[in-house]
Image: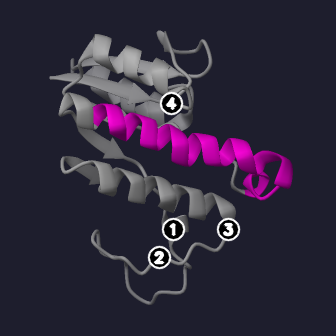
């Protein structure tokens, strides 16, 4: 199975790539920085299409995100936060749809309000983001669900 991982310059993507290597999987890692073997700006739709079409993965594990929760609230960052968490996610989902490729989207508990008394179930739709980061991650999650039949939200 050919796997493509986004955001390998971050903590989650880095750990996912290490685990895939440990399991001797055929995995390709990307990041906006040159810390990855494939430099990719997920907000660039043409670049996403070119890279994924060339690699032809069986599945994409989408770990890339703007994760600086407090900084996401700053007005000067909101456009970039949206571009990464929503537009970038949509770009990946669209290409996965074209390629009939599975996609694993890593979301966050920030899509909920934190006021529940029981753990949320995987199919819970009681969204109530309390901040901009949570709202953009939710919009990314909804884009994946809208565009793909073969996905997993974690």
Say if 154 sits above or below 116 in the image: above
Disc 3/disc 2 C-alpha distance (Å): 12 Å
Residue visible at 77% across and 59% down?
Answer: 73
The answer to whether the residue labelled 4 contacts the one labelled 1, judged by CB atoms less than 8 Å apart, is no
* Residue 23 % position (x, y): 22, 24
Q: Which residue is mark 2?
A: 127
Residue 90 vs residue 32, the one in the foreground: 90
Residue visible at 58% across and 15% down?
Answer: 35
The answer to whether the residue labelled 3 contacts the one labelled 2, judged by CB atoms less than 8 Å apart, is no
Q: What span is colored magenta in the figure? A: 70-96
Residue visible at 49% across and 66% down?
Answer: 109
Magenta span contains residue 82: yes
Disc count in the image?
4
Q: Which residue is mark 1?
A: 111
Q: Which residue is mark 4?
A: 7
Comes first in the chain, label 4 or label 3: 4
Disc 4/disc 1 C-alpha distance (Å): 20 Å
Comes first in the chain, label 3 or label 1: 1
């Amino acid at each position: 199975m050919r796997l493509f991982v986004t955001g390998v310059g971050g903590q989650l993507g880095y750990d996912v790539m290490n685990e895939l290597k440990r399991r001797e999987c055929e995995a390709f890692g990307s990041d906006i920085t040159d810390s990855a073997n494939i430099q990719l700006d997920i907000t660039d739709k043409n670049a996403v299409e070119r890279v994924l079409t060339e690699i032809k993965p069986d599945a994409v594990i989408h770990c890339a995100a703007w994760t600086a929760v407090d900084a996401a609230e700053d007005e000067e960052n909101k456009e970039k936060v949206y571009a990464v968490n929503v537009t970038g996610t949509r770009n990946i989902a669209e290409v996965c749809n074209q390629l009939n490729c599975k996609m694993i989207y890593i979301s966050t508990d920030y899509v909920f309000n934190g006021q529940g008394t029981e753990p949320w179930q995987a199919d819970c739709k009681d969204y109530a983001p309390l901040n901009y980061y949570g709202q953009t991650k939710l919009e990314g999650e909804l884009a994946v669900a809208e565009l793909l039949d073969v996905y997993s939200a974690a």
